[in-house]
Amino acid sequence: MSLVVTTYIPEGIIMASDSRQSLTVAGKNAEGKDFNLETINSDSVTKTFLLEKQKIGISNFGQDLLGGVPMASHIKRFKEEIVGDSDDVEVIASKIGDFFRKEFPDADTGFQIGGYKKDSKVSVPYVFYVHVSRKVLERRNEKPDKNIAYGATWSGQVDVLTGIMQPSLLPGPDGKIQQINKAPIIWDAMALQDAIDFSVYAIRTTIDTIRFQARPKNVGGSIDILAITPDGANWIQKKELYGESR
């Protein structure tokens, strides 16, 4: 499992992800009985990628090992074999779903795609949600009236963050269940630095919460953050390879 968060505000798009890869190992114990063990395989997996020429970000969540191959290798192949130099964010969102369904139609794997597309002289932001086995392709930053929406979308292990952000059902003074609304976030007025801070908060809070809960620790490791604006794309923070000394 994973947690990927894309925050989209007037200044730009911030894409963030954790680095943990969890696996379920099946086997037999000494008595010959079957067992399934969920274990942490790595805290160094990349889940957010940048298409440099197109200035488009891709974050993946859900099933990571497809055909026994890590997602980073599949994304590299997708970039080399499928992506065209002139492909825009809408084309990429459509192509990535088709690419993975061709070989892995039942994969419980999803993507968030973010980038800008020129409409006349205006750079228009697009944020897409794509899921392989569910055959979903939907734009997340568009209002019903087709105007641009600002906010955040998160996928993967979402229960902690959703519990914080969404209304809750709690017993009132009379014992009856009532909806408790949360104070709103004014996304339209949010600065780019605040969007970065929110993305870190969203993932770090999930990591810290599940640390203390009796549950699989399937979100963890360092947090990668990619910023995309009409002027370009750059990494705010990204894990690097290192040797024994740091």
Image (tube, rainbow, N blue to C red):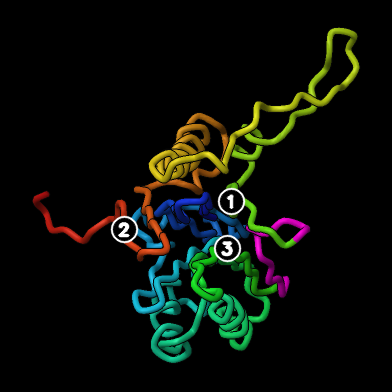
Q: Residues within 10 Å of mark 1 (few under 14, many from 20)?
A: many
Image vertical order of residue 178 relative to residue 209, above or below: above
* Mark found first going from the N terminus, 2 or 1: 1
Q: Which residue is mark 1?
A: 154
Image vertical order of residue 19 relative to residue 171, above or below: below
Residue 51 appears left or right of 123: left
Q: Which residue is mark 2?
A: 235
Quadrant of residue 47 within the rendered picture: bottom left
Q: How many marks?
A: 3
Residue 222 image offset from top left, x and y in percent: 34, 48
Q: Nearer the viewer, residue 68 or 81?
A: 81
Q: Which residue is mark 3?
A: 127
Amino acid type at circle 3 is Val
Q: Nearer the viewer, mark 3 or mark 1?
A: 3
Residue 199 appears left or right of 27: left
| Residue 3 appears in the figure | no
What is the spatial separation of the Cα atoms under label 3 and label 2, in whole angstroms?
Answer: 18 Å
State the residue at coordinates (56%, 85%): 99
State the residue at coordinates (58%, 56%): 36
Image vertical order of residue 213 relative to residue 222, above or below: above
State the residue at coordinates (62%, 60%): 34
